[in-house]
Image (cartoon, coloured by chain):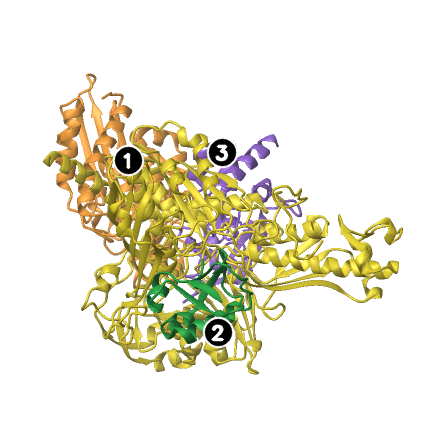
Chain colours: A orange, B purple, C green, D yellow
């Protein structure tokens, strides 16, 4: 096992693409170290990306934001502009684990760990975020929902690395929110997660919406039917009811130690509705 | 497994050590440097007993590789008191009987200090959420929260 | 003579709710009980406690049993 | 003062008892200096690791360690063959420490290695080849009792059933308690309610995993450093399992990072000693958190039926409980204690409880704070709550009408001495919490709890130092601040300042045998022995003063830390302080010490009432505890802060048990949640402050009136919260934990039921 801490993205890509056997990116390490400790992975090479300056920065980019892959949740939470524009994304990222975990965990790491229950991912998907991917064959930008393909599996090719998460420019009268269900108040993995992002027109009618759910399928899912329930409405009680029903209908969960199918399906609707209410308030609308 | 040579700062002192790649900072502190104040309760980042400050932020040292500490600034419970003078948090933990067995105490102290460094006047709810990553099985947290409140008030007095 | 009250499993084993034994202390009491009621023997061997006037004795075999006291047989307790 | 005199705690003016001095081990614990189980090292130390069965039930055909032994750095490997199959009483302990013939649960130890590093040890474990024949398994208590269930032990014949069964089963024993005839009682009742309840297994959840450092010399003498609640128990058990003389093993108790009953037996200690003996080097074993969950003792899961009848006037006429507990792979579920405590709060004419001790393919249960009592209290107090509602009576009123008092014949047998249940109930009714308004979707629950409290073998030495300070050696590991209480007690008796006494937990070679720190016994028994050791020393101090003055020892009294002539007739001498006498001890007869050895009996039972307010989210089933108050009889609180700490800690462990903690087994018989991520103990943000009321009804069996306080506090919360949640959700919850899916299902089930009607 070898440890490298390159200072440029190119150097990181070169190391990852090399013939070292199994290589792993170390950003916050909050998943990787647990997997190593419990013998689930035994990488031959660990590439620590925290010494790459570009990956440690949050930059304003064409009205949106470019968040380096090694930016921690605590750093996200401390960025006022980001918090103002994308409160749902920041609250989702800040829900991951404890204060201690927040000092380390990253959006990109949460995305690439490819857990269906990742807290930040439904919020990112709802936000229409994309991932900037660097690899031996150059760079590409893809929607975040295309990164995870199943539990623990990503679409990234050997040598590829997510270098940043990109959040688009915000339309006026927009709001987003993320809610998760956990049995305790902290420290749990989401049993269900729901991210809602919506935009209103000047009359308070919803013109665009995205709804994403976590922990109800093999990966985070975008639910267009749920979004459709909001578009063209003032996000009133009837629309919210249809949204909840559509969210529940889109779930294809499993029974596991964290919750039953039945529970997840019902609570997905409840959370989608509650998240939509918060997003509406943030967009300046009222129920 | 290759061995990494690391130079870092711990509680203000320059320290150099060798470690294996898969050794955590907690392993290094406890087994190589004899700093056993940080405790291993879970090794998965769920209990906070291994909390240390890394470049001014509180982390679980079980989720940091020893190799990552190169050039960083690390503070552990052993560095909390100034010489023979206890930190107000330490004093208040004693005064409020905020510890029973005491194994979670180092982690709580480090996490509480990190909180008060950033927020000198936290509400009860803020304290409870800031310390949610530190498990205590003895006290039910009541006396810990009160000790932190009292230490915060003491520190605000300056 | 000591009147020993038995309930539950002890009562079942002895076949009655009260037995009489000649004993001045707990040790004598348990020895005689085992001799007089062989079905109680395995339970006695597993460990029992004796309550004398409401006070439970787990270990003190030579605790005297005052005349006329209320004596109860209990399983030996273990705690957390 | 005569040595056996009891002061009247109600009127006596204590100097120190009842105050809140800082604990003597405190500074070490806030600075990181305190040494816990895993904090000790020895030169040349090896790392020990244990290979565990991945199967819940499997015959071990063979274990091949040849490849592992050849790995460079591996110094010793042990299996069951390395342990002595001795006394029958220890057979289960031994089989649990290292599987013999069969692996009986997921996580059961099958072999162990000692190597030069953790990574070599881990690699070596992977090279050990175990040939398993997988057998059918059972992990549920009711399933395990069915005929045809997979059988764990071919020779298990249910004990205490007449006539004895002919065939083996998973039922280790039956027990029964009570008096009168419940059926007669039910006929006298106006309302009878019968319900079934289930609780899942929970773990003590101490934050410090089991850890020890063993060093066996080639002369057969051994040293063991270990975190345990009872180092004498560890010594005696390990010596027996390794075939050693007890005198050759010295065990030192480290600081202990929580136990709650879970550190009252051995797991890794005999293994570390066996590895060290074989390797000729010190061996340290530290369990991982996963091992703690899979292979140390959780408590039992239970399945219970409770039937209680009351009159409209609120008198309980009959009570019946049938309790089934699985205690893992070996006999010993705490069902007897559960059955005994079931109705212990009440004064009943017709009462019966029957218990069944069942084995399953789970780790052997270990004691957990008032073992057996919380789950049974959950069932009984839930039914009482429902009965109170049915007859329209205030739940405290119902309990007061039936509360046991001095002279009541307890449901488990003997008559009660002086007890404080009524006082606790009255304090609860008068507490502002009881009548505070509730918010929407909130409910309030109340429940009573009982625990026996133990005494046990105890030995204390108190040495007077040359400067008049005192060295106090106790043999009960300090699990909750007992060194502070013992220093207070010694100083109180001697009449010297608190900080002049220093208490240590002595190792097994320095002090006589002490029972485990369990059963809420330490402040009671070690406190009692400390009082008597101090009085023994005072007798000697007075004798030295008498010698100095040339008067009879009977003419000297001890007051406020000084020897004084008992009256002007005895002579006119200036009082001698403890320090004065200590300074001259070398010339007046040698060192001065007080000792006391006792089978401490007379521990007073203790009662508590808990009040809980819970809010239930009707759409998700999520429960939040909004307010919580503990009211408990402590007899006499020596250090009130640590008494409150016991109340609060027990309550919060109960909150965890009630709401989210559970052992989750898959169909494959493997534990699904062996970590703090998915075994969800309460975190700080889950909880409100836990209010406490210390009631003091002195225990006549202790000189100060002390009652144990550590365990009673976990007995009522399960029921108090279930009653609160049931009130908030308007549906009776009968299964623990009341996790959101379970609560939501109950709410939805009730709504569906209403819709059908």
> Seen in the image, is D35 located left or right of residue A84?
right
Q: Is residue D735 visible?
A: no
Q: Chain of mark 2?
A: D
In the figure, residue D84 lies in which quadrant? bottom left
Q: Chain of mark 3?
A: B
Crowdedness near tag 3: few (<14), some (14–19) or many (≥20) residues, C-alpha within 10 Å: few
Pick whichever of labels 2 and 1 is earlier in the sequence: 2
In the figure, residue D748 lies in which quadrant? top left
Residues C74 and A112: in front is C74
* Mark 1 vs 3: CB contact within 8 A: no
Residue sitting farthest toward the top: A203
Q: Is residue D436 visible?
A: yes
Query: Can you give x and y, in whole percent of width and height, for residue A204 in the image?
Result: 20, 19
Residues A88 and D629: in front is D629
The residue under label 2 is D238
Query: Can you give x and y, in whole percent of width and height, for residue A218 in the image?
Result: 19, 49
The residue under label 3 is B119
Crowdedness near tag 1: few (<14), some (14–19) or many (≥20) residues, C-alpha within 10 Å: some
- Specify the label residue D391 is tagged with: 1
């Amino acid at each position: 096992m070898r440890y490298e801490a390159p200072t440029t993205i190119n150097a990181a890509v070169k190391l990852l693409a090399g013939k070292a056997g199994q290589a792993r990116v170390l950003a916050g390490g909050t998943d990787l170290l647990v997997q190593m400790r419990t013998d689930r992975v035994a990488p031959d090479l660990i590439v620590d990306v925290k010494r790459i300056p570009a990956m440690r920065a949050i930059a304003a980019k064409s009205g949106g934001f470019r968040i380096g892959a090694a930016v921690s949740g605590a750093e996200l939470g401390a960025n006022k502009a980001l918090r103002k524009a994308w409160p749902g994304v920041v609250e989702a990222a800040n829900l991951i684990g404890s204060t201690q975990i927040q000092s380390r965990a990253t959006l990109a790491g949460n995305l690439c760990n490819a857990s269906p229950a990742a807290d930040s991912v439904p919020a990112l998907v709802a936000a229409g975020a994309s991932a900037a991917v660097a690899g031996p064959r150059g760079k590409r930008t893809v929607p975040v929902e295309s990164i995870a393909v199943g539990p623990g599996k990503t679409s990234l090719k050997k040598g590829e690395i997510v270098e940043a998460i990109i959040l688009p420019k915000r339309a006026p009268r927009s709001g987003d929110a993320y809610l998760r269900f956990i049995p305790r108040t902290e420290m749990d993995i989401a049993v269900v997660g729901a991210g809602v992002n919506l935009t209103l027109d000047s009359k308070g009618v919803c013109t665009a919406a995205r709804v994403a759910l976590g922990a109800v399928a093999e990966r985070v899912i975008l639910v267009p039917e749920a979004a459709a329930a909001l578009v063209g409405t003032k996000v009133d009680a009837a629309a919210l009811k249809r949204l909840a029903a559509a969210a529940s209908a889109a779930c294809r969960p499993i029974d596991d130690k964290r919750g039953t199918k039945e529970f997840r399906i019902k609570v997905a609707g409840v959370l989608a509705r509650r998240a939509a209410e918060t997003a509406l308030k943030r967009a300046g609308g009222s129920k | 497994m290759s061995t990494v040579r690391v130079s870092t700062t711990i509680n203000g002192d320059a320290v150099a050590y060798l470690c294996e790649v898969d050794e955590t900072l907690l392993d290094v502190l406890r087994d190589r440097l004899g700093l056993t104040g940080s405790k291993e309760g879970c090794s998965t980042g769920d209990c906070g007993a291994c909390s240390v400050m890394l470049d001014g932020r509180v982390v679980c040292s079980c989720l940091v590789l020893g190799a990552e500490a190169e050039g960083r600034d690390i503070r552990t419970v052993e560095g909390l008191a100034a010489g023979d003078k206890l930190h107000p948090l330490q004093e208040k933990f004693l005064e409020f009987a905020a510890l029973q067995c005491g194994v979670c105490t180092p982690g709580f102290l480090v996490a509480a200090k990190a909180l008060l460094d950033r927020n000198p006047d936290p509400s009860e709810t803020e304290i409870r959420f800031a310390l949610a990553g530190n498990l205590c099985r003895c006290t039910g947290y009541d006396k810990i929260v009160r000790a932190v409140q009292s230490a915060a008030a003491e520190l605000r007095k300056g | 003579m000591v009147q020993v009250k038995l309930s539950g499993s002890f009562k079942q084993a002895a076949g009655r709710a009260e037995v009489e034994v000649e004993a001045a202390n707990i040790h004598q009491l348990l020895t005689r009980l085992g001799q007089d009621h062989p079905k109680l023997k395995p339970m006695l061997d597993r460990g029992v406690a004796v309550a004398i006037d409401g006070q439970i004795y787990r270990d003190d075999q030579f605790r005297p049993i005052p005349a006329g006291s209320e004596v109860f047989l209990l399983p030996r307790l273990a705690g957390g | 003062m005569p040595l056996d005199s009891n002061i009247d705690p109600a009127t006596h003016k204590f100097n120190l008892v009842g105050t809140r001095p800082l604990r003597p081990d405190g500074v070490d614990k806030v600075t990181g200096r305190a040494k816990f189980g895993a904090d000790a090292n020895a030169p040349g130390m090896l790392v020990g690791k244990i290979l565990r069965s991945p199967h819940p039930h499997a015959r071990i055909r063979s274990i091949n360690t040849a490849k592992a032994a050849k790995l460079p750095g591996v110094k010793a490997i042990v299996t069951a063959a390395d342990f002595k199959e001795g006394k029958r009483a220890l057979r289960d302990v031994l089989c649990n420490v290292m599987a013999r013939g069969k692996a009986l649960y997921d996580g059961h130890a099958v072999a162990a290695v000692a190597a030069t590093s953790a990574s070599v040890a881990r690699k070596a474990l992977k090279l050990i080849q175990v040939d398993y024949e997988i057998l059918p398994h059972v992990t549920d208590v009711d399933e395990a009792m069915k005929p045809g269930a997979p059988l764990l032990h071919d020779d298990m014949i249910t004990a205490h059933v007449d006539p004895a069964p002919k065939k083996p089963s998973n039922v280790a024993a039956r027990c029964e308690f009570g008096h009168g005839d419940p059926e007669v009682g039910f006929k006298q009742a106006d309302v009878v309610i019968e319900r079934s309840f289930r609780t899942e297994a929970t773990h003590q959840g101490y934050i410090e995993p089991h850890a020890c450092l063993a060093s066996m010399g080639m002369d057969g003498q051994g040293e063991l450093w270990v975190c345990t609640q009872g180092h004498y128990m560890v010594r005696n058990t390990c010596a027996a399992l390794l075939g050693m003389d007890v005198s050759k093993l010295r065990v030192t108790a480290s600081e202990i990072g929580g136990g709650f009953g879970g550190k009252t037996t051995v797991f890794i200690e005999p293994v570390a000693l066996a590895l060290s003996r074989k390797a000729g080097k010190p061996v340290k074993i530290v369990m991982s958190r996963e091992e703690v969950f899979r292979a140390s003792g959780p408590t039992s899961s239970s399945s219970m039926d409770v039937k209680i009848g009351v009159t409209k006037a609120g008198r309980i006429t009959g009570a019946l409980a049938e309790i089934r507990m699985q205690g893992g792979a070996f006999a010993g579920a705490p069902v007897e204690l559960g059955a005994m405590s079931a109705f212990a709060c009440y004064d009943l004419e017709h009462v019966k409880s029957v218990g069944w001790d069942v084995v399953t393919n789970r780790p052997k249960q270990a004691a957990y704070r008032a073992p057996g009592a919380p789950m049974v209290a959950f069932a009984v107090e839930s039914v009482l709550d429902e009965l109170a509602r049915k007859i329209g009576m205030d739940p405290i009123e119902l309990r007061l009408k039936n509360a046991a008092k001095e002279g009541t014949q307890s449901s488990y047998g003997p008559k009660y001495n002086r007890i404080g249940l009524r006082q606790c109930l009255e304090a609860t009714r008068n507490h502002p919490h009881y009548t505070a308004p509730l918010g929407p979707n909130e409910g309030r629950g109340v429940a009573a709890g009982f625990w026996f409290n133990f005494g046990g073998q105890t030995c204390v030495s108190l040495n007077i130092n040359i400067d008049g300070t005192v060295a106090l050696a106790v043999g009960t590991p300090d699990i909750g601040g007992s060194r502070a209480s013992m220093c207070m007690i010694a100083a109180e008796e001697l009449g010297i300042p608190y900080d002049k006494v220093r208490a240590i937990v002595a190792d097994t070679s320095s002090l006589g045998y002490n029972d485990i720190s369990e059963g809420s016994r330490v402040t009671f028994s070690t406190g009692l022995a400390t009082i008597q050791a101090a009085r023994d020393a005072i007798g000697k101090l007075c004798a030295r003063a008498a010698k100095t003055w040339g008067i009879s020892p009977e003419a000297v009294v001890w007051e406020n830390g000084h020897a004084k002539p008992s009256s002007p007739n005895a002579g006119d001498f200036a009082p001698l302080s403890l320090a004065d006498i200590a300074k001259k001890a070398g010339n007046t007869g040698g060192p001065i010490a007080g000792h006391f050895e006792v089978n401490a009996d007379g521990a007073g039972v203790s009662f508590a009432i808990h009040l809980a307010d819970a809010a239930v989210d009707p759409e998700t089933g999520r429960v939040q505890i909004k307010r919580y108050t503990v009211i408990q009889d402590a007899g006499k609180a020596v250090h009130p802060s640590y008494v409150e700490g016991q109340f609060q800690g027990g309550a919060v462990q109960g909150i965890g048990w009630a709401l989210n903690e559970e052992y989750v087994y898959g169909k494959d018989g493997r534990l699904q949640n062996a970590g703090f991520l998915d075994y969800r103990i309460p975190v700080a943000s889950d909880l409100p402050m836990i209010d406490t009321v210390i009631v003091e009804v002195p225990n006549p069996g202790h000189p100060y009136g002390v009652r144990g306080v550590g365990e009673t506090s976990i007995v009522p919360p399960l029921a108090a919260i279930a009653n609160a949640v049931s009130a908030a959700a308007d549906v009776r919850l009968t299964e623990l934990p009341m996790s959101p899916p379970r609560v939501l299902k109950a709410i939805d089930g009730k709504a569906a039921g209403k819709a059908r009607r």
